[in-house]
C-alpha cells in the first residue's frame, strides 16, 4: 500500500508551502535560468564574522558571473528560504554559531519554532531538491569520522547523498574525517564520486587525498551528461563532484596534518560529541593555522562556485532523452 510510505496518512505532504523565494531567485526561475544552491552552515558555523559575510557575497558573485543565479539556503522566521536578500545574509553571518545547525533531523523543529537555522550539506540538499535546484556548491562535505568504528559518527550528509537527487560540488573532505571510509560508505550507497581537474578525490586544503574518485570528468558537458543519464535511468540520489583547491592556495599536507591531529586530540580530551564535533574541529583548525586555513577555504569555495556554475548551465541544456544526445 502506498499510504504506508507517507509520513502521515491524513494529509499528503505539501513541502512547497514551506518555501519562500527571494526576488532574485524567483526571477531566475521564472526566466528559466539555472540556479545554484549554496549552504549556510558554512556561513554561520564555518567561518568567523565578517569574513563569512564577505566570502558568501564573493561566492554569490562568482556564480552570477558564469550565468546561473545563486540561491543561498537557510531557515528564517519559520520558512525555508531559497535565496537570501542582502540584509538576510547579514543576519545569518552576524548570528554565527547562534544559528541552529540544521541537518535532516533538525529541519522540522527549527521551522516549527521559527528559529534561525543554517543548513548543512544534508539540510541544503533537501531544500534544494524541494526547490527543483539540481546543483549545490559547498566547501567540504561531512563524512565518516576517524574512530567511527566505536563512535558511529557518520555524517547525515552521506545518507542524504544516497537519497536526494542533487549534485554536490565540493573540494572533497577535510582529513578531520577518515576519507577512505567516507568513500566506502558512498560506494555502499551507490553515490557516484566524480572528480574534475585531477584523478584524486580532493582533501580540502590539500589537493590530493591519496584516494581516487570513481571517474574523472573535467568538462562540464560530460559531467552534465553523466548526471542527466543517472537521473534519466530513475537512479535517484545525489552525485558528488570533487575539485581541488587552486594550486596557489593549497596548504602543505604535513602542516594541515599537524593542526588536525591536535584538534582531534583536544576534541577527545574535552568529550565533544554529536553535532558539535565538526564545528569544534573546524574552529580549532582555523585557530591553530593562525588564519592560513581561512584564505585557502575562501579560495576553494570560489573555485567550487565556478565549477558548479558551469555544470548548472550545462545541465540545464541537457535534454535527458536516452541516447538522443549522442546520436
Ligand atoms: N566540513 C567542512 N566544512 C563545513 C562542514 C563540514 O570542511 O562547513 C559543515 C557542512 O555544513 C557539513 C556539516 O554538512 O559541517 C557536517 O556536519 P556533521 O559532521 O555534524 O554531519
Ligand atoms: Mn557527526
Image (cartoon, helix red, strand yellow):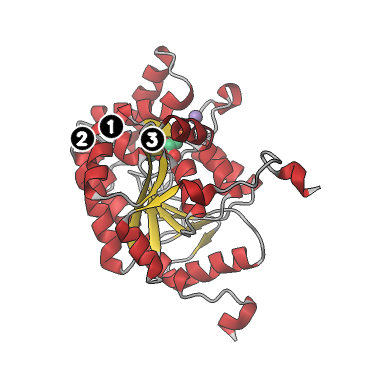
Label annotation for residue 96: 1
In this rendering, the answer to whether 287 lies above or below 86 is: above
Determine the CA span between mark 1 and mark 3: 10 Å
Residue 175 visible? The answer is: no
For this rendering, which residue is in front, 252 or 187? 187
Mark 2 Cα-neighbour bin, 10 Å: few <14, some 14–19, many ≥20: some
Instruction: Tell me which numbered mark, 3 or 2, is placed earlier along the sequence.
Output: 2
Q: Where is residue 34 shown, x and y percent of the image?
A: 40, 66
Element assignment for label 2: loop
For this rendering, which residue is in front, 254 or 262? 262
Report if the beta carbon of the residue with label 3 is closer than 8 angstroms to ligand 1: no
- Along the horizontal axis of the image, is 10 left or right of 319? right
Element assignment for label 1: helix
Label annotation for residue 108: none
Residue 141 visible? The answer is: yes
Q: Where is residue 213 shown, x and y percent of the image?
A: 51, 54
Image quadrant in which the C terminus is located: bottom right
Q: Where is residue 35 shown, x and y percent of the image?
A: 39, 62
For this rendering, which residue is in front, 324 or 74? 74
Q: Please give the name of the residue rendered at 46% of the width and 27% of the height, measured from the top-left corner.
A: 275
Do residues under tags 2 and 1 come within 8 Å of each other at their CB atoms? yes
Mark 3 Cα-neighbour bin, 10 Å: few <14, some 14–19, many ≥20: many
Determine the CA span between mark 2 and mark 1: 7 Å
Q: Where is residue 174 shown, x and y percent of the image?
A: 40, 39
Q: Nearer the viewer, mark 3 or mark 2?
A: 3
In this rendering, the answer to whether 142 lies above or below 213 is: above
The residue tagged 3 is: 117
The residue tagged 2 is: 49
Amino acid at each position: 500500500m502506498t499510504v504506508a510510505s507517507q509520513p502521515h496518512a491524513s494529509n499528503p505532504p505539501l513541502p512547497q508551502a514551506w518555501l519562500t523565494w527571494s526576488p532574485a531567485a524567483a526571477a531566475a526561475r521564472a526566466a528559466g535560468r539555472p540556479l545554484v544552491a549554496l549552504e549556510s552552515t558554512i556561513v554561520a558555523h564555518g567561518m568567523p564574522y565578517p569574513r563569512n559575510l564577505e566570502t558568501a557575497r564573493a561566492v554569490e558573485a562568482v556564480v552570477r558571473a558564469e550565468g546561473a543565479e545563486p540561491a543561498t539556503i537557510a531557515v528564517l522566521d519559520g520558512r525555508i528560504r531559497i535565496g537570501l536578500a542582502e540584509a538576510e545574509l547579514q543576519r545569518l553571518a552576524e548570528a554565527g554559531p547562534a544559528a541552529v545547525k540544521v541537518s535532516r533531523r533538525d529541519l522540522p523543529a527549527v521551522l516549527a519554532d521559527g528559529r534561525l537555522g543554517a543548513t548543512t550539506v544534508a539540510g541544503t540538499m533537501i531544500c534544494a531538491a524541494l526547490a527543483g535546484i539540481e546543483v549545490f556548491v559547498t566547501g567540504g562535505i561531512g563524512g565518516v569520522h576517524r574512530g567511527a568504528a566505536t563512535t558511529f559518527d557518520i555524517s547525515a550528509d552521506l545518507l542524504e547523498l544516497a537519497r536526494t537527487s542533487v549534485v554536490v560540488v565540493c573540494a572533497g573532505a577535510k582529513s578531520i574525517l577518515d576519507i577512505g571510509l567516507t568513500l566506502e560508505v558512498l560506494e555502499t550507497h551507490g553515490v557516484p564520486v566524480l572528480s574534475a581537474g585531477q584523478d584524486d578525490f580532493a582533501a580540502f586544503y590539500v589537493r590530493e587525498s591519496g584516494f581516487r574518485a570513481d571517474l574523472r570528468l573535467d568538462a562540464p558537458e560530460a559531467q552534465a551528461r553523466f548526471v542527466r543519464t543517472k537521473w534519466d535511468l530513475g537512479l535517484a540520489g545525489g552525485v558528488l563532484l570533487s575539485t581541488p583547491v587552486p594550486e596557489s592556495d593549497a596548504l602543505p599536507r604535513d602542516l594541515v596534518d599537524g593542526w588536525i591531529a591536535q584538534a582531534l586530540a583536544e576534541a577527545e580530551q574535552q568529550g565533544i560529541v554529536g553535532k558539535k564535533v565538526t564545528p569544534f574541529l573546524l574552529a580549532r583548525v582555523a585557530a591553530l593555522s593562525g588564519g592560513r586555513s581561512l584564505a585557502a577555504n575562501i579560495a576553494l569555495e570560489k573555485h567550487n562556485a565556478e565549477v558548479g556554475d558551469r555544470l548548472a548551465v550545462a545541465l540545464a541544456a541537457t535534454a535527458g532523452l536516452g541516447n538522443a544526445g549522442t546520436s
